[in-house]
Each structure stands twice: as structure tokens, then as C-alpha cells.
Image (spheres, rainbow, N blue to C red):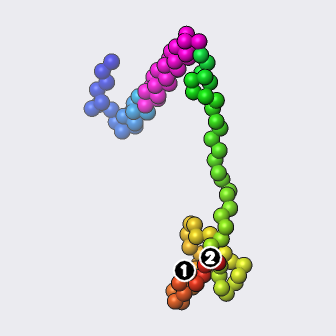
Amino acid sequence: MAVDIKNLNHNQLNDLINKAQLRQNELRKEKVGKLREKIHALIKAEGYTFEDIFGHGRAKVRRTGVTVAPKYRNPADPEQTWSGRGKRPRWFNDALKAGKKEKDLAI
């Protein structure tokens, strides 16, 4: 199947590229599925289970929303703190501009 890409306009060419990428993904999934079946058949033929070979799957724990202890405190307003992660708060930048040092603001 030869496609003369020189006669395709921009939209047709993008459509062809998208279809080719979809087909490539389909072929990859089919190949992975066949390989997975072969591996399971080989493991079973040897008298083992998948868990015997690879162990029990552990769920990946994603740490979201973990609060970090504050490292810096605003001397003008002790309620304002900063953990030292992420963008510097305004009060921190203002204190540095006023001549304070990071160690002066440390808790």
C-alpha cells in the first residue's frame, strides 16, 4: 500500500499521521498481549505461578498532600510560615530585600 504523500494537503497528511500512530499503538498492544500469553504459558509449563516468579504486586503509594514542617517564620507576623519549598512568599522576599538573611528567618 503506497500512499503518495506529495499530493496530500495539510489536513489529509495530519489525518494519515494520526491513523498511522493509532495503528502502531494497536500493533504494539497486540504484540504485548501475545508476549504476555507466552510468558504465562512458559511459567505454567514449568509448574510455577506468576506470583512465584515475580512476587505479589505492590500497589504504588503516591504521597499527595503531605504537609512539611515550616522552616521559616515571618518576624512581623508569626502566623505566616514557609516550609522552604515552592515559590518564596512575598514576606520572605521583602525581608531579604530589607537586609535580613535566611538564617534570621529560620525557626
Residue 72 is tagged as: 2
Q: Which residues are magenta?
A: 21-47
Q: Quadrant of the C terminus?
A: bottom right
Query: Do the CB atoms of the residues marked 1 and 2 lie less than 8 Å apart?
Result: yes
Circle 1 residue: 102
Task: From the viewer's perspective, tell me whether residue 35 is left or right of residue 70.
Answer: left
x then y, percent, for residue 90: 59, 78
Q: Quadrant of the N terminus?
A: top left
Residue at left offset 61%, top offset 28%: 55
Q: Is residue 98 above or below residue 91?
A: below
Examine the rendering and report whether any part of residue 52 can be seen. yes
Mark 1 and mark 2: span between their CA atoms?
8 Å
Amino acid residing under circle 2: Tyr
Amino acid residing under circle 1: Glu
Between 18 and 106, the one nearer to me in the picture:
106
* Residue located farthest toward the right when viewing the structure as drawn: 79
Between 69 and 46, the one nearer to me in the picture:
46
Residue at left offset 56%, top offset 66%: 86
Residue 42 among magenta residues: yes
Residue 36 is tagged as: none
Would you say the magenta stretch is mainly helix, strand or loop?
A: helix
Between 68 and 89, the one nearer to me in the picture:
68
Residue 34 among magenta residues: yes
x then y, percent, for residue 94: 56, 84
x then y, percent, for residue 101: 53, 84
